[in-house]
Amino acid sequence: MKYVLVTGGVVSGLGKGVTASSIGVVLRACGLRVTCIKIDPYLNTDAGTMSPFEHGEVFVLDDGGEVDLDLGNYERFVDVTLTRDNNITTGKIYQSVLDKERRGDYLGKTVQVVPHITDAIRNWIESVSVIPVDGKEGPADVCVIELGGTVGDIESMPFIEALRQLSFSVGQEKFCLIHVSLIPVLGVVGEQKTKPTQHSVRELRALGLTPHLLACRSAQPLLENTKQKLSQFCHVAAGNILNIHDVPNIWHIPLLLRNQNAHRSILQQLNLLSIATPPDLKDWTKMAETYDNLTNSVRIAMVGKYVGLTDSYLSVVKALLHACIACSLKPEIDWIAASDLEDDSAKLTPEAHAAAWKTLRNAACVLVPGGFGDRGVRGMILAAKYARENNVPYLGICLGMQISVIEFARAVLGLERADSTEFDAQTPNPVVIFMPEGSRTHMGSTMRLGSRRTLFQTPDCITSKLYKNSEYVDERHRHRYEVNPDVIGSLEEAGLKFVGKDDSGRRMEILELPSHPFYVGVQFHPEFKSRPRRPSALFLGLILAATGQLETYLRGNQSNC
Ligand code: GLN
């Protein structure tokens, strides 16, 4: 196994994750098999209990791992299926060491950060890197490891030390360190400043790690003399100083790296030049260019709770992008804070209320994504009602599906107080209920998580056709509540059809309203498996419906999609 370690310096938010996944893309394009590990030095065991407001979306893996959203970037870019162990956190490492200590495995020794925590980190990396993630047998050729945070952070110290030991033990030809840094431009002269990078490289070297390549983030391309300076003061060959300047879209990053021969430098360091092929990035070039040249757009109303931080719905945004690109359309996402649609907001914040409704009415389709807690739920119900009554294409994901059930029960069945027990524990009409296997006392990893099978109940429905008439579909889940099986009969009689169920037949997975052009709710999260060249069927369906192309598409004439 060969390792490519990506560290970051100066500031966070440099796009280290995108850089690391783009390196994976380029190496893969050279014919190598690639796996990835993301290290998050925080204490949380996983991202499951972290607020999307603060940390962005919680990404869910096939195995039910609730992980950092960067793992989503890796899956989408490198086209792999990762496991929960590909995300290492301080919490996981300490938990494993403390479990061992309690079992008595350390035989009376004093358990310490060095060597016990650092050994646990090394062992974790070495054992996870050999798990195949690309559907093939046997270990990958290269493991890209991204160390979260910035070099010098107190909490990343044990990881840096473990990685230093790893680089020493595997030897020169198996370890390549790429340091991502920032080159700011200051003052009227507009000079590109190298000092912050010099400092962070010095810090890294003081900790025993010397970068082989620098990936410098900057607004404009780096000047030749900036590169010379960096090379001289940072102890990195000029040819190994890469520049990631601002680009119109992130799909350009692998191309930018390839154009600077990043692959050659990395392959040379890892002594892999002889087995690698020249990078084939035709698909990426096409994608990046298509994206740049889109002229027509489609307006999508995203009605959610966490609209202040768009990273909260990162995979949904990406899935919309993948679907739109497949239809040669630019996504125009209109974020609507669900609470702004509510009647209360008409009194308290009339302008925001009017603006939210105007935006909703202007959109070609409505998407209500997943979420937790009751904030904004009334607004989401109004959005679902608006879409249902006005034949506007609607996709409800997880919470969005539960919302459409509540709305339908209230408006069509006349059950005014119909609700989810998540929002009203005392509701006389619980149409969405807590799942029996959930835990009421523990939040972490106690939901119904990961890949589960949905069986189509009939081939004669939009979603089955979108999934190419397959009998079942495996999608990822993350929920505690479900549609109450006792109300299915009355909902179906009134016209809401549950066309996808789990294998027990008691758990509702997909709903459709046959009388509507596209009204779909899914208990799972199709966004997590959407990939740039393989858009999620349901997102594609939504965009096609929004642009009046769905029927033609379903009839087999796939027009320009
Ligand atoms: N809060 C709902 C549940 O737990 C929906 C979850 C979600 O949208 N991911 O079932």
Image: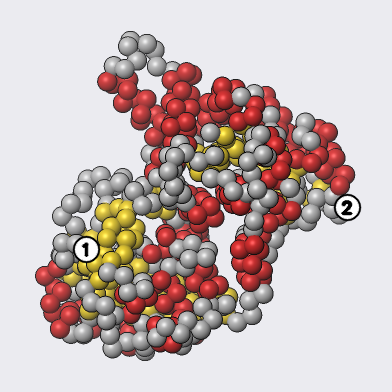
Q: Is residue 68 left or right of residue 279?
A: left
Pointer 2 residue: 189
Rendered residue at 47%/81% (across/down):
558
Image location (x, y in percent) of residue 282: 64, 62
User: Which residue type carries mark 2?
Assistant: Val
Pointer 1 residue: 502
How packed mark 2 is, by other alpha carbons closer than 10 Å (few <14, some 14-19, many 20 or more), is few
Image location (x, y in percent) of residue 384: 34, 79
Rendered residue at 36%/72% (across/down):
467
Image location (x, y in percent) of residue 334: 51, 74
The answer to whether one can see residue 457 in this image is: yes
Picture layout, residue 434 above or below residue 84: below
Which quarter of the figure has residue 398?
Answer: bottom left
- Of circles 2 and 1, which is in front? 1
The answer to whether one can see residue 343 in this image is: no
Q: Secondary structure at mark 2?
A: loop
Q: Between residues 63 and 393, which one lies in front from this camera angle?
A: 63
Q: Is residue 249 left or right of residue 166?
A: right
Q: Residue furthest front?
A: 274
Q: Residue furthest top?
A: 108
Query: Does label 2 or label 1 sit earlier along the sequence?
Result: 2
Q: Between residues 486 and 542, which one lies in front from this camera angle?
A: 542
Picture layout, residue 333 above or below residue 103: below
Q: Between residues 561 and 40, which one lies in front from this camera angle?
A: 561
Picture layout, residue 113 above or below residue 425: above
Q: Is residue 211 left or right of residue 327?
A: right
